[in-house]
Amino acid sequence: MRFFLAVTLAVCASLSLAQTDVANGTVVKVGCLYPLSGAGGLYGRDSQVAIAMAQDHLAAKGGYPKLDVTVRDSRSKTLRSLLIARSFVEDDGVDFLCGVVSSAVALTVSDYARSSETFFIGTDHASPALTSTHLHPYYFRVTNGARQSMSAGAQYIAEHYAAQGLLKISFIGPDYDYGYRSYEDLRRFLDDLGVQYDVVSTYWPKLFDTDFSLYIRNIMADEPDIVVNAHWGLDLVTFVRQADRLGLFKQSQFMNFDTGGNYEILAELGSDMPAGLVLSARHHLNWPKTAANQTFVQEFHQRTGRFPSYSAEGAYSGILAIAEAVRQAGGTADKEKIKTALETLSLALPEDPDGFQSYMDPKHHQIMQAQAIGRTGPNADFPPAQMMLTDISVYFPPPQWPDFSGQ
Amino acid sequence: MIFGRDGRNGSVAKNYLFAALFAALLPLILISVLYDRYSAQLIDTISHSRAEGELEAVTSRMGSFLGGHLNRLENIVDLPETARFLGSGQPINEASDLLDFLLLEAESQDVYSIELLDPKGKVLAVVPSSDGFRGDVLPTTPIISFQNAEVVGPVLPADGYPGWFQFSLPVKVDHQILGYAVMRMRLASLTEQMQPLELEGIRTPQLVVFDRMKLKSTGAMATGETILQSSRAILPGWHLELVAQNDQLTSPRQTLRIVLLLLSALLAAVMVLLFLRLSHRLNTYLAPLKAGADAVSRGDFMTAVPETGPGELGSLAKAFNHMRRHLRDMINSRVESERRASLGNLAAGIAHEVRNPLATVVTALYGLKRQETKGDRIEMYDEIAEEIERVDQTIEEFLKYARPARPNVERVAVRDVFRSLHTLTAAKLMEHGVTLNLGGESRLEFEIDEAHLRQILLNLILNSIDALPQGGLISLTALRVGGDVQIRVEDNGTGMTEEVLAKVLRPFFTTRTRGSGLGLAVCAELVRSNGGRMDIESAEGKGTKVTLTFPRSAKRSGADDQDHPDH
């Protein structure tokens, strides 16, 4: 009887311990890799702020585990990122890796996450390879990928330009996996939609290049109707400035469906941003005009005195996703439960329009979100940006993430 | 032609024009020649000399780029870990130093990947791990040996992937090949280095591999044709070429040169034509002046020069005409005064030599007549006395004409003179059935010798009565015209032929049997001596109009200082 009582008490104690683990107890360790210095430093710094906002949000809401989040400067370097990831796992014993802006770096980190059986919550990188050919049970992405952007972009072209007849398209993107996938996906979606088009040229300047004039002149010589660009960050800012001066925008319609409408691009270009460019982003400050989005933007502004780049909302989503998954799994001990929780994740995020909630595609571990595409137009509500997206078209995700890897 | 071709001095105007033409053409020709030489040298410079240095610099840079990366691959091959890994036959350890080293080497944006292969070519490790393209080597892909490496490629951009090439080095231990280390390179990183050789719209560089693959700076296929320069080889079979962009270097620039030269020639021709036309126009304005001067030298003062020339030429023509009129008046005045002086002497002689004997004859005749009793003889004496009286009268008129009395100017009311004349001629008018109308400005007054005016008008009225044998109408009108006084005597009588009209003012010209032929001449002289002018218009069968024009204020100098235009 004593033994039975003792066993019963022990079981009860362990059960209650598990509950407290989640409610207030065991700390969930998260190691995030973001560039905090160099060209992409702004993304990391904004992500740090958003991570703190997410932690405060969870604490205020209650019922979520405490997250101990460490952010280290990856400088978007592959080897450095790999070393940091190893250190996070092997020295700090983190439960989750998160972040990573560059897809090339993410592929290496993801490979390590697979081998070390550590969950990797991708936030800002966008290559479809991570959720298809390189997918493994421990990788989940909580921001829209380039494939979703290209799907929405193809729909935008079909809706607004297909009536013109055969379209001459030039594609220019950074010379790495993200660029190649974006181009491949755009063509697939345009083909699926039956758009009549002809690719007159494709160009692959180096990532982090500073002189695009050679390529801009070549594009202008090709005389396309539409230039689809897949650059991001300072590359895109530099490209837009140089293309504007060389007259590309007067000749062809410029489009960037994945990152062009990111606030940091609009802010960096300020009044140099031309009107009429077709752009999109993974998070917009002026869309959707929901209370959640406006609160997120204003709170970020109150904390930093500046408006958030797209990466902030990505990091915010990552922390919420980790907390929600751990809460549902009842702790970090059972990785299968966490995996299941992530695969069936449904989150209300600032970027969700009314009546829609982001959800995880269980097969591909890619979160499914709405995508808004618009044209740049004068709007000084979010200085230093002088142009924001207007005339917005919204594209909701398909029921399943489009996987081309088996084809 | 005004400008004497045979004159020693030629034409000054033409000389000036040709000097101006020369002054305009010389700089044009000089500039054209200098610019043409400059253009030719520029084309030569662009296409040859300067390009050589630039091409050599870029070739060296590209060679250095390739050598540097080959050196990095050699470092990998030399690592003992590489040989150990290839010799082990095991998968690469995620935590191995070799992986870290390979990641570090592959960090460059110019390197797509580093691969380690077994001796049969099977891929054992790829860094960085990427789902990127593998890019198959085609049967047509160039493969060369460079130093101890094998260079495969370039493989051109295709199907949404960029172009690439690779270095492959064997990993050996004791002369036994354990495998291969391969560095897959970004082709555009090599071709982009040609960018400084771009001269937009003029020339473009291209990387040529075995003369069958030609690549632009972007790494895409090139289409250039006209080769301007070739470089030395950067790898066996790989070299650079500078090509004219669609022959834009030579053809359009040469065309531009020719067009510029043609334009210069055209401009010169237009200038010559313009100057010839100017010369011709100047001639047309100056030729009449010369003709006018010739006419004056021949004594023709009546030929006027057209005053339609522009600017100074028009002013010159006006001044010439003014000079001609003035000269004519001066000469006429002088001739007239000389004529009048001799006429005066003649008249004085006649008066002395004829009238005195006539007085004696008349006295004698009177004595004879008193003594005569026979009626027919008395009648004959009367006829002789009458004829002598007529001769005396004629001599009197001749004297008046030759030595007119100086006018005694006073203010005269035209109305009084007209009325007086009407009264004086009333009987004769009635006799001939002629009506005299007085009209015009009744209160008109002006300064003139009243006796002269009466004599002039009386003479004219009597002439008109003579021209109205069947009766008719005479109008006597006084008007103020501008600053002058105009008196018109007009009749609707027989009028005169042009021939008669031309001679009517000559002394002793008369159409009447008993006229002295001095009436109108005397009238004209009296008018002239009162500063006036007499104009006669007449049409045979229709009548005659005599217009007298006097200044309102007396100006007695007569016609000597008048300058009225020619009629």
Image: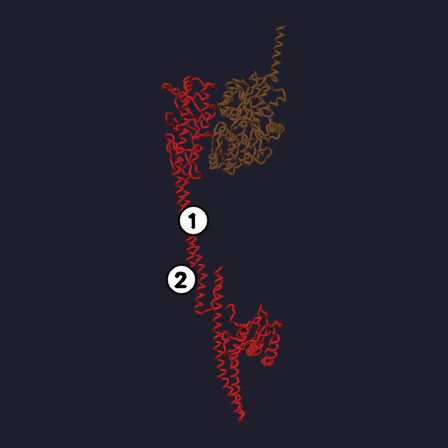
Chain colours: A brown, B red
Closer-to-camera residue (A290/B426): B426
Contact (CB < 8 A) between labels 1 and 2? no
Q: In the rendered structure, which disc, 1 or 2, sits on the residue that comes first in sequence?
A: 2
Label 1 crowding class (10 Å Cα cut-off): few <14, some 14-19, many 20+? few
Q: Which residue is mark 1?
A: B263
Visible residue check, residue A259? yes
Closer-to-camera residue (A154/A134): A134
Q: Secondary structure at mark 1?
A: helix
Residue B338 to residue A187: above or below: below
Q: Secondary structure at mark 2?
A: loop
Q: Which residue is mark 2?
A: B4
Visible residue check, residue A133? no
Closer-to-camera residue (B74/B92): B74
Quarter residue B441 falls in:
bottom right
Mark 1–mark 2 Cα distance, whole angstroms, equals: 35 Å
Image side of residue B458 versus residue B290, left or right: right
Q: Residue at x 39, y 40 (%)?
A: B45
Quarter residue A291 falls in:
top right
Q: Can you say which quadrant of the picture contains the N terminus of chain A?
A: top right
Pointer 1 chain? B
Name the spot of residue B368 as percent of width and height, x first.
Answer: 52, 91
